[in-house]
Image (spheres, helix red, strand yellow):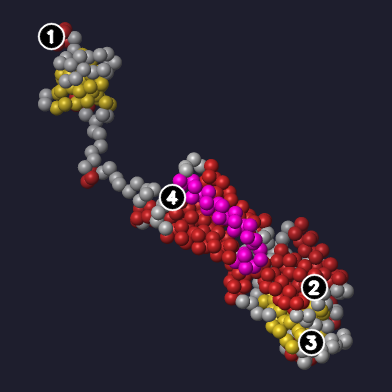
Amino acid sequence: MLPAIQADTSTVYVIPIEDEVERGLQAFIERGIEEAEDAGAEAIVFEIDTPGGFVAAADGIARLLDKTSLKKIAFINQDALSAGAFLALHNDEIYMHPNGRMGAAQVIDQAGNAAADKANSAWLASMKNAAQTASRNPQIALAMADASIDLPELGAAEGKLLTLGAAEAEQVNYSQGTVSTLDELLSLKGLEDATVVTIDETFSESLARFLTNPIVVPILLSIAGLGLLLELFTPGVGVPGFIGLTFLMLFFYGHLVAGLAGYESIVLLVIGFGLLIAEFIIPGGVAGFLGIAAILGSVLLAGGDLKTTAIAVLIAMIVATIGMVIVVKFFGKRLDLFKRIILTDATDTAGGYVSTTNRPELVGKIAQTVTALRPSGTIKLDDERIDAVSEGRFIDSGKDVKIIKVEGSRIVVRELEKQEEE
């Protein structure tokens, strides 16, 4: 058994690692570690119960754990799967609940399939290094992330990822003991009299974790994009623009609280909107183009992970465009806000409009020019005045003409020769 920590006036900080591992969690853990360091804590207990999460976030949290000089103890209260297992390996000691599990750490893409070789290779190297740094068997860590590694004695036959239970983990030195409660762990470490400080998420941190989730981000940007597009094409309405701005501000709020966005991204956003307003005042296209580019740049800058944010922006642009088409096509004529961009009037008979009718019966009729035809003008047939054109020659007014062709609304006439009149 490892020696107990002296705890005359010790302080132990407890930081939970719960739910999905994402960038918002990283900001919360960073705050907790900083508070523990400022307080001169004897140790930090990371109480882990997570199904895993995103590789980039797990890597960022692991760097925070490696950076601190405080003693780090992982208490796997239930599950440390996938990214959770990786984070547990970055602790100095690991303790597990009797029903705890640790492992199943293969990298999965967004479609739910095994990641490409390049990403998986980097992840395997990270798992191996984390185990070796803490003097643990690296082959076991690799078996958690690579189904091709065969460890049948631990329940990881070829084709199956390794997941350790509490007893198995203790057997292979991946756990220093099995405890049912945090108090039992503290007692085991000689810290039963220590002052325990539990770091809880604030409301803003919980909201930021939700808003910075890689699944939520494209939704926020899609609604923001659709709202701003509708406002752009229906200026003065206000409601779509208000909704779009609200969701865009939620995106920036979450990333600011999570520590992913700096104030430079907000400045760029303000500049972008300023350029868009300038476009309405001084049209020309240049200011509008630069404004859109500035807004997109601010979003990419605020996202932290450029690749992930770029994918989210692309998804948002596609969804917003499709949404705009659907709204205009199916609801445009029913909503007053689209009257500025959609022609709803119809030139029908009920509105007093009459389409041109073909009049072939006029061919061969004799009429008289009311005005000169140069080559178009007016002729009179009986008591009806009709617009007509000559074959190309000038025909003076008061001349007799013969209708020789009718093509819809186009009536062609020829001046009568004397012999033709006789």
Q: Earlier in the sequence, mark 3 or mark 2?
A: 3
Residue 383: horizontal and vertical position, in percent?
A: 11, 26
Q: Which secondary structure is most common in the magenta stretch?
A: helix
Q: What amino acid type should be assigned to the residue bearing mark 3?
A: Ser
Instruction: Tell me the magenta residue range.
Output: 254-281
Q: Find the distance from the CA under tag 3 to the CA under tag 1.
A: 130 Å
- In x, y percent, where is residue 157? 80, 72
State how far apart marks 3 and 2 are (Cα).
Answer: 18 Å
Identify the amino acid type marked 4: Phe
Determine which residue is flagged by label 2: 68
| Residue 313 seen in the current view | no
Front position in the image: 23 or 330: 23
Q: Nearer the viewer, mark 1 or mark 2?
A: 2
* Amino acid marked by disc 2: Thr
**Disc 2 from disc 4: Cα separation:** 53 Å
For marks 3 and 1, give the one nearer the viewer: 3
Q: Of label 3 and label 4, which has the lower sequence position?
A: 3
Determine which residue is flagged by label 4.
Answer: 233
Q: Give the mark nearest the N terminus, 2 or 4.
A: 2
- Label 1–label 2 contact, CB within 8 A: no
The residue identified by callout 3 is 10
Q: Which residue is mark 1?
A: 422
Name which residue type carries label 1. Answer: Glu
Residue at 60% x, 66% y: name it.
254
Alpha-carbon span between mark 1 and mark 2: 117 Å
| Spatial separation of the CA atoms under disc 4 and disc 1 | 67 Å
Q: Residue at x 18, y 22 (%)?
A: 379
- Mark 3 or mark 1, which has the lower sequence index? 3
Kindly indicate the quadrant of the structure image that contains residue 151: bottom right
Q: Nearer the viewer, mark 3 or mark 4?
A: 3
Query: How many other residues sit within 10 Å of disc 4, few (<14), some (14-19) or many (≥20)?
Result: few
Q: Helix, strand, or loop for circle 4?
A: helix
